[in-house]
Image (tube, coloured by chain):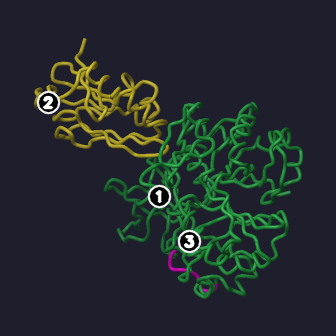
Chain colours: A yellow, B green
Amino acid sequence: MSTVRFSEDHEWIAIDGDIGTVGITDHAQEQLGDIVFVEVPESGRVVAKGEECAVVESVKAASEIYSPVAGEIIEGNATLVDAPETANSDPAGAGWFFKIKLSDPSDLDTLMDESAYNTFVGS
Amino acid sequence: MNDGILKKTPLHDLHITLGARMVPFAGYEMPVQYPLGVMAEHLHTRSQAGLFDVSHMGQLRLYGDNRAKLLETLVTADVQNLPVGATRYTLFTNDNGGILDDLMVTNAGDHLYLVVNAACKDADIAHLRRIFGDDLEVQADAALIALQGPAAAAVMARLAPASTALVFMTSAGVQIGGHDCVLTRAGYTGEDGFEISIAGAQAMDLAALLLQQPEVEAIGLGARDSLRLEAGLCLYGHDIDSTTTPVEAGLPWAISKSRRLGGGFPGAELIQKQLAGGTARKRVGIRPLGRAPVREGAVLSTADGAEIGHITSGGYGPSVAGPVAMGYVTAANSTLGTPLNAIVRGKPLAVEIAALPFVAQNYHRS
């Protein structure tokens, strides 16, 4: 079972070795409403922690997705681009945005675990 | 704005009960969406009927013997020849021909009934007060409820049989559920429908009665915006404002024929010149060719990078099932089908000039 961490920008990252899979939380998709467009980063792109690297748009507004860790993008979710509503229906699963090879695993120490995140959005 | 304290409409408690997400809008706390969500609310309005609380808009009455003639000094409509029971869309203009607000005016027999935008309400009242003095009555405690969609007529026929006599842009006093209402067959969605003016104290009863009808769902401001955008209708402060003229905005039809010739409203001379000779820029429909929505503020440029306009409203059109927008471009680039780029997040996205509206209007004209 992989470790999952959460950012204050409402992204989750599931860690398997030095590879992280990143998506938006159920709370985030609920706040955004009906998602109609998603842009994911290209593989090979190197991003800093907190860098804007994907876009999610609902009927009403556009929002940026920030990388919760530094590293190199190894895959964007092409399925999500074709079916952006997947980020509403399965945000923690098939609605993932991108996979990233972490350059500094200590970035994870700055993120929240699930219970801390639940407290964060509940507050 | 009232020290940051948001005003509430007479239907506020209903929105809370229905689980609406409330947001600040034009000084009011308003429902942006209900649990159904913007997409489903939009599609429900196009297929059945949606109830909208638009009580934040200003409802005004003008009295006095010369009311029609006096109002004509401020707006572009032929008010003097407006038949009793008829409604017109018109514009308050300024001396530069810019639009101060867009509004509906109805000849209610013993007075003129005006509906103005919430964000412009205070300025409009001051503007009218200078001319009308005490002959201007602000209906501050009245509610305004819109019922919009193809099933609106059947719902209204059930509750107010007299409504069947109304065609698009006409108005009458009717009783609904035992309450006195002013019913106007008009709206802001491109669909057939009604706007119902009622005393604030009776608005909860009326809204509950309407929501009991199987065709009706409550619809928030989010879907109201996507519906009006698909219908090609202007949003004041975005698609039109004090720097855009009615001719640039593609609203010459809001200037009555007699007023085009006779003038007599602020900025008439400049507007008459533009009606005859055209304008340097025009409001147009914009259709993004990809899937990405193109939103307000995005710059429009030609293939060689020349900046020729910008987007004033844009988003996703649920009925179109794709992105839709409108904006201003130079006249030379305003022909239907002209390919342009919209700059979104620093990247050029292919768009083209498209016909407005994006969906067929469904008004009950006869």
Instruction: Residue at 63% x, 71% y: name it.
Output: B91
* Chain ID at mark 1: B
What x and y, as percent, mark residue B104?
A: 69, 64
Q: Relative to B115, is A5 above or below?
A: above
Q: Residues within 10 Å of mark 1 (few under 14, many from 20)?
A: many
Residue B128 shows which numbered tag? none
Please indicate whether residue B322 sits to the left or right of residue B84 in the image.
Answer: left
Q: Is residue A5 above or below residue A58?
A: above
Q: Is residue B246 or residue B202 the one in the foreground?
A: B202
Q: CA distance from mark 1 to mark 2?
A: 40 Å
Q: Chain of mark 3?
A: B
Q: Is residue B157 left or right of residue A13?
A: right
The boundaries of the magenta stretch are B276-282
| Outermost residue toward the top in this view | A1
Q: Identify residue for label 3.
A: B100
Question: Which is in the foreground here, disc 1 or disc 3?
Answer: 3
Q: Which residue is mark 2?
A: A107
Element at badge 2? helix
The chain containing the residue under callout 2 comes to A
- Within 10 Å of disc 2 (Cα), the crowding (few <14, some 14-19, many 20+) is few
Residues at badges 1 and 2 in contact (C-beta under 8 Å)?
Answer: no
In this view of the protein, which residue sits in the foreground, A7 or B79?
B79
Mark number, residue B351? 1
Does the magenta-highlighted stretch encompass residue B173?
no
